[in-house]
């Protein structure tokens, strides 16, 4: 019997902040209040998002027409969003903040003409809209806004090639534009949205190696690419081990580390990493669904290790914790629970959970898979009778 699980993109990260080395005076405004913004970044990566949000609010109040603090609000809300992709309020606040920094950036450019700071944060706003649409599989929107962001940052790099962190935006676009699904990739090439995978990777590595504020974001994105798109699991383990050690209270990096072990086939380390994460009282979360998802991840590792008896209670813990539409959006959790129950020959329980799949959204043909499993069990029971 095949084992199925949805592999949702967790992390497509982007922080578009340049390094401060040898910049022309025209770029100095980008680095205003640098120490306060470094504090915000540290709070974000340590997952103290409430504290980061309070500092950003104070910066907005000091200068409500400055695009910079609005961009950092986008970053704060992005990390809320990736903590619970099913939260409608997190989605709405992320989109609102991205649209706000675009609005303020355009206003500054209209008033001042050429304005490197306004261009920079305008591009950042476009970049976050692009990333949101990648997560929601709205590919044409993603590459429409991604191209806008890329064009702005290419122009900035043409003027000053020591803006190493700007390579993160350009590299992200170039990589993902080259990874489009077949027909979309052809369409993107025709309308001038094509990318270059290897060039994109090189640009991302430049941002990770030579950038300043973008180092964590660049490493995160490279780790995600290694994990989910390139199959370089050893490299993904190395990156997420490093980030987990640097930011111990951030559950995202440690969850991705567990996933990297699991994808490499090292289920023992995947289980221990996830178990340690759930047992660590210093971890910060933005939603109970984030915790529910970790129990599902732990259960999946047990399941792949064929330890169905331990997988079942973890899947059920996910079900009991989940709030809102989490379970309706996660048919694979019920399907995998049923699979484990069936493997343990608990056929009545297996039927119960296969039927629950039919009450969820029908992603990746899980309804058909559940119906076939229900029919298989019933046929076997009829033969037995």
Image (cartoon, rainbow, N blue to C red):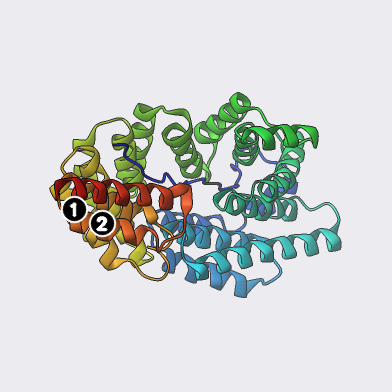
Write down the quadrant of residue 262 in the picture: top left
* x then y, percent, for residue 370: 36, 51
Write down the quadrant of residue 73 in the picture: bottom right
In depth, the one of 378 and 123 nearer the eye is 378
Vertical order, 337 against 5 (above or below): below
Q: Give the residue at x 30% y 60%.
A: 292
Which numbered tag is attached to residue 130?
none
* x then y, percent, for residue 359: 40, 64
Mark 2 → mark 1, Cα distance in angstroms = 6 Å
In depth, the one of 171 and 258 nearer the eye is 258
Q: Count the numbered circles shown.
A: 2
* x then y, percent, for residue 89: 51, 71
In depth, the one of 265 and 105 nearer the eye is 265
Q: Is residue 23 visible?
A: yes
> Badge 2 is on which residue?
351
Vertical order, 194 against 46 (above or below): above
Write down the quadrant of residue 198 in the picture: top right
Q: Is residue 249 visible?
A: no
In depth, the one of 139 and 131 nearer the eye is 139
For label 2, count other residues whose C-alpha is less than 10 Å away and answer few (under 14), some (14-19) or many (20+). Answer: many
Left or right of residue 38: residue 192: right
Q: Give the residue at x 66% y 71%.
A: 63
Q: Give the residue at x 36% y 39%.
A: 240
> Badge 1 is on which residue?
347
Left or right of residue 245: residue 232: right
For label 1, count other residues whose C-alpha is less than 10 Å away and answer few (under 14), some (14-19) or many (20+). Answer: some
Marks 2 and 1 in Cβ contact (< 8 Å)? yes
């Amino acid at each position: 019997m095949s084992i199925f699980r949805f592999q949702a993109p967790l992390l497509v990260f982007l922080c578009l902040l340049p390094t401060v080395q040898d910049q022309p005076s025209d770029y100095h405004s980008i680095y205003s209040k640098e120490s306060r913004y470094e504090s915000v970044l540290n709070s974000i990566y340590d997952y103290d998002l409430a504290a980061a949000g309070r500092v950003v609010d104070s910066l907005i109040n000091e200068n409500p027409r400055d695009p910079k603090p609005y961009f950092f609000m986008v970053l704060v809300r992005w990390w809320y969003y990736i903590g619970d992709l099913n939260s409608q309020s997190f989605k709405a606040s992320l989109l609102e903040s991205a649209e706000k920094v675009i609005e303020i950036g355009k206003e500054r450019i209209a008033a001042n003409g050429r304005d490197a700071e306004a261009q920079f944060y305008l591009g950042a706003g476009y970049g976050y809209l692009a990333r949101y649409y990648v997560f929601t599989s709205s590919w044409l929107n993603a590459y429409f806004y991604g191209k806008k962001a890329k064009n702005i940052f290419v122009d900035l790099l043409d003027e000053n090639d020591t803006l190493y962190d700007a390579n993160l935006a350009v590299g992200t676009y170039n990589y993902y534009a080259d990874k489009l699904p077949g027909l979309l990739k052809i369409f993107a090439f025709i309308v001038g949205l094509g990318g270059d995978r290897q060039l994109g990777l090189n640009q991302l590595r430049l941002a990770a190696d030579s950038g300043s504020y973008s180092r964590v974001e660049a490493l995160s994105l490279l780790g995600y690419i290694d994990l989910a798109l390139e199959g370089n699991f050893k490299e993904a383990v190395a990156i997420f081990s490093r980030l987990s050690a640097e930011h111990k209270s951030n559950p995202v990096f440690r969850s991705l580390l567990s996933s990297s072990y699991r994808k490499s086939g090292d289920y023992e380390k995947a289980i221990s990493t996830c178990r340690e994460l759930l047992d660590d009282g210093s971890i910060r979360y933005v939603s109970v669904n984030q915790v529910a998802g970790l129990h599902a991840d732990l259960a999946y590792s047990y399941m792949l290790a064929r330890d169905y008896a331990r997988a079942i209670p973890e899947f059920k813990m996910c079900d009991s914790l989940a709030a809102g539409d989490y379970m309706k959006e996660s048919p694979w959790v019920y399907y995998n629970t049923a699979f484990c129950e069936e493997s343990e020959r608990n056929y009545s329980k297996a039927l119960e959970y296969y039927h629950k799949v039919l009450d969820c959204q029908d992603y990746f043909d899980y309804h058909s898979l559940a119906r076939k499993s229900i029919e298989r069990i019933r046929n076997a029971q009829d033969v037995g009778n």
